């Protein structure tokens, strides 16, 4: 047992000087009593803090203060609960605690001597300390300290680790601590929808360049809202949400087409100087992001049709321009959007007539074929360096997508595409070997297979 006064004094010295010496005036039987914690000359109670590790320290206190501000001490010092022993002519109350909570118990005893009226906001020394004090205050039944802790924790910002600690502890403390969790409570579906609709409108708008970071953040959060990970998506898209998203993307495409027309009407070099090409790139980035959102909502059809309709103009704009780093970057962004559109077509997400599918292949197969070597060859070079990267998986995905689209076309259209591929200098990419092998097999066995089918159905076909 450690009963040396210096041990307790050392524990208290770590606390703010003004708090440890704070004097409160109490009226008792119309007599003014001046008390301070650990004042042995006026103390009538010893609070003995003990831990399982053998730590045993005495703190000299005053029954009047303890019983007025703590239900635990009021019970322990009542006639209904005899004290365990008398130490130094004083009542003694043993309080057992974990070693990790020892300092929090000292803090709570100290705070019982402070006026808990909002004037102690600077005494908590951070979220973790306040959280520890709160747990002890609840345990010892100190309503004033509990209220002050709750008010503090509810108002101050939290670090991520602190928030996780609060989520671990506070829900088990009952209604008195509920205000702390107000910022973490789920909101109503109508509030979520309102946030989503406002964000999608901003994310598909064309704000000044100075607001691009804000727009990028809005786009990221929209995608996060709709993503199913460890948690379900934040909202389920109903028809109202889908309609608003389609309208927003429609307006985005309208602005994109307007820029496209401007690029076709003026020399590319002049519009580059006017910043139109930068705006064109920005809209391509927005369209690439919009494709992801539309795919999550399963409403890609209008987007795909609009892109296919604009395909010839898009390719013409970049092909007529002089090869510069800026144009190469623009081509890479075009590839990103085209990949999303072609994926929707190739995997049957969006059903298009044969003519449109054939047109998509005839426009984008040659473009991808000649653009890949250009993008792959881009290197850093001095102050004007620009590193353009497209994930290798995207190139592989495009190759598989082209094979899927081609194999779904009529065999004569397949033959035309494969004939052009076999005679092209860029035969290595996209590698259409799989499509070629399937076409050869189908063509060779076509008469036999179809004659068997026709015979079984009583139909005669001439091939």
Image (cartoon, rainbow, N blue to C red):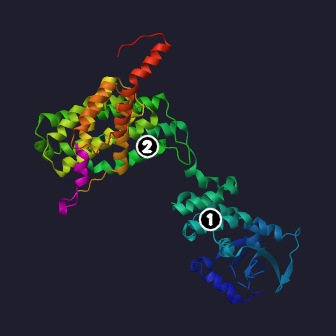
Location of residue 113 (image quadrant): bottom right
In this rendering, the answer to whether 353 lies above or below 73 is above
Q: CA distance from mark 2 to mark 1?
A: 34 Å
In this rendering, the answer to whether 138 lies above or below 84 is above
Is residue 378 rendered magenta in the image?
A: yes
Q: Is residue 291 left or right of residue 124?
A: left
Q: Is residue 21 visible?
A: no
Q: Is residue 278 visible?
A: yes
The dot on residue 375 is: none
x and y percentages locating residue 434 in the rendered image: 37, 38
Please name which of the two marks, 2 or 1, marks the residue nearer to the observer: 2
Is residue 278 rendered magenta in the image?
A: no
Q: Mark 1 or mark 2, which is nearer the start of the sequence?
A: 1
Task: Kindly identify which residue carries mark 1.
Answer: 131
Provide the residue span drawn in magenta: 370-385
x and y percentages locating residue 234 in the rendered image: 52, 42
| Residue that appears at 42% across and 34% down | 347
Q: Quadrant of the N terminus?
A: bottom right
Front residue (pair 86, 340): 340
| Residue that appears at 65% across and 71% down | 111
Task: Kindly identify which residue carries mark 2.
Answer: 222
x and y percentages locating residue 265 in the rendered image: 12, 33
Q: Quadrant of the C terminus?
A: top left
Q: Are marks 2 and 1 in contact (CB under 8 Å)?
A: no
| Residue that appears at 59% across and 81% down | 14
Q: Is residue 455 left or right of residue 330?
A: right
Front residue (pair 205, 71): 205
- Secondary structure under badge 1? helix
- Secondary structure under badge 2? helix
């Amino acid at each position: 047992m450690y009963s040396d006064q210096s041990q307790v004094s050392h524990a208290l010295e770590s606390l703010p000087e003004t708090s440890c010496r704070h004097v409160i005036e109490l009226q008792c039987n119309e007599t003014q009593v001046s008390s301070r914690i650990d004042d042995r000359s006026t103390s009538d109670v010893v609070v003995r803090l003990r831990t399982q590790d053998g730590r045993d320290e005495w703190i000299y206190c005053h029954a009047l203060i303890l019983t007025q501000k703590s239900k635990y001490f009021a019970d322990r010092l009542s006639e209904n609960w005899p004290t365990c022993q008398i130490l130094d002519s004083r009542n003694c109350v043993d309080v057992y605690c974990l070693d990790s909570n020892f300092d929090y118990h000292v803090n709570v005893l100290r705070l019982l001597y402070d006026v808990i009226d909002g004037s102690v906001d600077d005494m908590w020394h951070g979220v973790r300390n306040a959280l520890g004090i709160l747990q002890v205050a609840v345990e010892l039944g100190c309503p004033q300290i509990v209220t002050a802790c709750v008010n503090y924790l509810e108002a101050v910002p939290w670090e991520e680790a602190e928030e996780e600690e609060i989520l671990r502890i506070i829900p088990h403390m009952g209604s008195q601590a509920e205000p702390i969790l107000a910022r973490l409570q789920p909101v109503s579906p109508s509030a979520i929808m309102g946030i989503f609709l406002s964000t999608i409108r901003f994310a598909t708008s064309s704000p000044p360049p100075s607001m691009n970071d804000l727009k990028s953040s809005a786009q990221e959060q929209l995608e996060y809202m709709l993503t199913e990970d460890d948690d379900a998506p934040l909202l389920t898209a109903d028809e109202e949400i889908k309609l608003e998203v389609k309208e927003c993307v429609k307006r985005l495409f309208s602005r994109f087409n307007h820029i496209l027309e401007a690029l076709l009407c003026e020399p590319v070099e002049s519009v580059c100087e006017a910043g139109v090409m930068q705006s064109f790139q920005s809209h391509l980035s927005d369209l690439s992001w919009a494709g992801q959102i539309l795919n999550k909502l399963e409403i890609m059809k209008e987007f795909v049709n609009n892109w296919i309709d604009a395909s010839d103009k898009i390719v013409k704009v970049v092909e007529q321009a002089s090869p510069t780093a800026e144009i190469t970057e623009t081509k890479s962004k075009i590839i990103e959007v085209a990949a999303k559109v072609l994926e929707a077509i190739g995997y049957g997400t969006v059903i298009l007539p044969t003519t449109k599918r054939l047109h998509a292949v005839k426009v984008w197969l040659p473009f991808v074929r000649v653009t890949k070597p250009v993008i792959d060859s881009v290197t850093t070079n001095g102050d004007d360096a620009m590193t353009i990267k497209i994930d290798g998986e995207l190139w592989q995905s495009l190759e598989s997508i082209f094979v899927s689209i081609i194999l779904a076309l009529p065999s004569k259209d397949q033959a035309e595409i494969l004939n052009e591929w076999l005679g092209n200098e860029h035969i290595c990419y996209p590698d259409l070997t799989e499509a070629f092998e399937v076409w050869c097999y189908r063509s060779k066995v076509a008469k036999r297979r179809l004659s068997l089918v026709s015979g079984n159905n009583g139909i005669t076909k001439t091939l």
